[in-house]
Image (tube, rainbow, N blue to C red):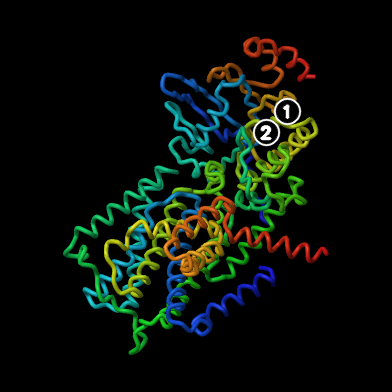
Amino acid sequence: MIEPLNKITTKVEPVAILEVKKLSKDFGGLRAINQIDVDVQEGEILGVIGPNGSGKTTLYNLITGFLKPTEGQIRFKGKPITSMRSHEIAARGIGRTFQLSSIFSNLSVRENVIIGSHLRARDGIWGSFFRTKSYKEGGAELEQRVTKTLTFMGMEKQADQVAGSLPYGDQRKLELATTLALDPEILLLDEPATGMNPQETETMINLVKLIQEQGKTIVIVEHNMKVVMELCRRIVVLDYGVKIAEGMPEEVTTNEKVISVYLGRKRKWINAKS
Amino acid sequence: MTKQRWLANLLLLVVAILVPTIFKTPYLVHLFVLSGIFALFSLAYDIVIGMMGQFSFGHQALWGLGAYISALLAVDTGVSPWFTIPAGAIGTGIFGFAMGWISLRLRGAYLGIITLGFAVILQEVIINWKTVTHGWLQVLRIPAPKLGDTALNTPFSYYYLVLAFLLLTIYFIKSIQRSRFGRGLAALRENEQRAISLGIPIFKYMVVAFTISATLSGLAGALFAHYVHTINPNTLATSYLWAALIIVLVGGSGTLGGPLIGTLLFIFVPEWLRMAAALRFAVFGILIVVCVVFVPEGLYPRLLSLWNRFIVSRVKG
């Protein structure tokens, strides 16, 4: 074996996979998002917290192209995506979930995940009409992917149930499974643990950790501080569309501005920390 | 597909092929020819209504356009119907592409209105562009396609032509349902926002589906023209839209069997109702209302679920 002459050792620097620069969004006279700068580093789990109405979901909508910003730029893996259409942004590798569980209620669990795998599916109309080999292979491939995803989420037994008939916690799991099937590089989760009991929350936390271990970057908007403290290495705090704090959980939760914004919930924060 | 389903389909196919032999009366076979043509149109219409889950009140114009393109080419330029019928379908598809590209930026009632607008405009063009379309003077003596020296101008012979196209269409729609594209359509029908967030390019998919629907509607219209041998601007009347809509709603939208059952009922029930004489269409109307109110999912899905319950109870018992 030939040894490389120069072993290039590069210093591993944190790569910003998603960059939000001076982002603003006006709705008529209301400035919902005001000059926000956020960098999401590859492989991290970033928390986004803030009171209701602080602009967290609006931020997600801007990043994923459901809304167009008034000012500012968004870059994904170095390339600007600010003016791209939503489905293109998703195809580029940004997956998201919604605050109100967004699933295909009339379809089965399996079909939901199959749709999630849409961009990777190889069974197009032509192949379907002429029953080509690649169509059949594509179908088998799809089956495998879906089974793998369902097993990872622990939902194999529910595969043929109608999605709308699942308990709420499982619907949220299904939403996450479907988003995973997209095979995105970054997942934007919108309150994944809301409405879940402690057991379901624990399962969700473990799943998110596993997803990160697979090399994915995750951003979580959450109100449940237990989830945020356990998962997030960094947190960003929004209030009235402005970033008021950013840093490690310990710094952020002891920040006076942050505490005053959550006035009356100081006790909850201290409890969450322990 | 389960063995049961496969056998049922085979049986239906055999019966369909033997229809002219079973029902010897020309009038009955004529009704089956009309059923085949309307079934094709309804399947095409259901691509938009059932598969895509959107409104369209303009499909009667697509049906009529296919009829006119094919008929005018055959009558005024003497081209064989074997070419004009596909030309009618493709020409309608092109128009349908433009219609869809413009209209599908809207949803719901707005989409319904704009498609209706297209239909009205098209009908006016056909009425007024007399030099090309003959206006109200009609397009007469539309020739039937010829096999060698024999023209297919009997119900018996035309039946097989229509059946061939219908079977091809059924297989094509089945292929769509089983493909990535078909799943994408189902996704955007069920939850548009979620479909977008999973990377599905919904506008593109909707325009493609609408174009396919338009092409098949034009095909049905062309087959109609070469069967009835006369068309006029009334061929674009909303009556054809209501026919397709009733068929799809009563039979069951979003399924293959729905439009098929719906068409047979739509064509044959009024015949059976002749016993009610003058009240014939009143009764027909009441039956339609009863169906849509009490069986909103459609008769075909309801029959299927009853069948499954019956079979399950037999197996268990």
Q: Nearer the viewer, mark 1 or mark 2?
A: 2
Residue B37 vs residue A38, the one in the foreground: B37
Q: Quadrant of the C terminus of chain A?
A: top right
Q: Chain of mark 2?
A: A
Q: Which residue is mark 1?
A: A227
Farthest residue to the bottom: give it: B149
* Residue type of the residue flagged with mark 2: Pro
**What x and y, as percent, mark residue A264?**
69, 10
The answer to whether residue B270 is above or below residue A98 is: below
Residue B196 vs residue B307, the one in the foreground: B307
| Mark 2 neighbour density, 10 Å: few (under 14) some (14–19) many (20 or more) | many
Could you tell me which secondary element the residue under label 2 belongs to? loop
Q: Quadrant of residue A261?
A: top right
Farthest residue to the right: give it: B317
The answer to whether residue B148 is above or below residue B44 is: below
**What x and y, as percent, mark residue B168?**
49, 72
Could you tell me which secondary element the residue under label 1 belongs to? helix
**What x and y, as percent, mark residue B53?**
50, 50
| Mark 1 neighbour density, 10 Å: few (under 14) some (14–19) many (20 or more) | many
